[in-house]
Amino acid sequence: MKVIAGLGNPGSEYENTRHNIGFKAVDALSATYKIPVTKSKFNAVFGKGLINGEDVILVKPLTYMNLSGEAISPFLSFFKVAIDDFLVIYDDLDLPAGKIRVRQKGSAGGHNGIKSTISHLHTQEFKRLRIGIGRPDGMQPVVDYVLQPFSPVDQKAVTEAIELATKACYSWMTMPFDQVMNRFNR
């Protein structure tokens, strides 16, 4: 069994913001593979289903971004999922809007949702799929930027990136993760 968690903030006021791209990716997986994310447990919503014959749990923590690990850690423990079978999807300021990057492990890179996840899992050794949101222009504070919707130009690129992220998740079900990285990190 694999767990895919998308990071974001709950509530309609955050629904279409840059910081919620992890939620949008889980929503796309849910729609593509007919896995309703409607059950509640451990301060998250989740759904169980199959992707290419592999058991998968899709998770959206409801703890707000900065406390994501508080919801993710109990899921992995409760369902006895190995850290190697866990993938987190989240926004990345250091990638241009619409680019994705798949990684085997790494630091938080300043992302508070990943800091929380590392803290609660007691390891940095988990898979990540980052979706670029770009950096703010000028002097706009990052906190304001990530809580705003995408521009129309960026929205098109981000929609394509979410489709690509869905394909990367499917590939993870069918091939070793290093091959997924080679395929999608171009």
Image (cartoon, rainbow, N blue to C red):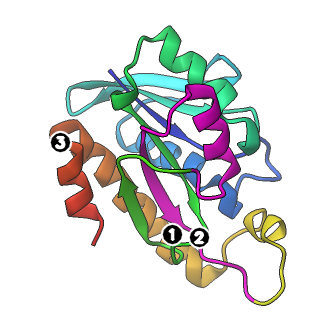
Q: Position of residue 115 (x, y in %)?
A: 65, 44
Dot 2: what SS? Answer: loop
User: Looking at the image, is mark 3 or mark 1 nearer the viewer?
Assistant: 3
Asked whether the viewer can see residue 38, the reply is no
Classify residue 182 as left or right of residue 28.
left
What's the magenta region? 108-137
Which residue occupies 56% across, 28% down? 122
Mark nearer the N terminus (3 vs 2): 2
**As rendered, which of 59 and 135 lies closer to the eye?**
135
Which three-letter amino acid code belongs to the residue tagged 2? Answer: Ile
Say which mark, if any, is on residue 176: 3
Say which mark, if any, is on residue 132: none
Circle 2 sits on which residue?
A: 133
| Mark 3 vs 2: CB contact within 8 A | no
What is the total number of numbered labels drawn onto the structure image? 3
How far is disc 3 from disc 2 in space, using C-alphas?
A: 27 Å
Which residue occupies 58% across, 36% down? 118
Can you say whether 76 is above or below 162 in the image? above
Circle 1 sits on which residue?
A: 158
Classify residue 63 as left or right of residue 181.
right
Classify mark 1: residues with Cα within 10 Å, few (<14), some (14-19) or many (20+): many
Which quarter shows the N terminus? top left
Mark nearer the N terminus (2 vs 1): 2
Residue 128 falls within the magenta-colored stretch: yes
Asked whether the viewer can see residue 21, the reply is yes
Can you say whether 159 is above or below 28 in the image? below
Dot 1: what SS? Answer: helix
| Mark 2 vs 1: CB contact within 8 A | yes
Q: Position of residue 97 (x, y in %)?
A: 54, 75
How far is disc 3 from disc 1 in space, using C-alphas?
A: 26 Å
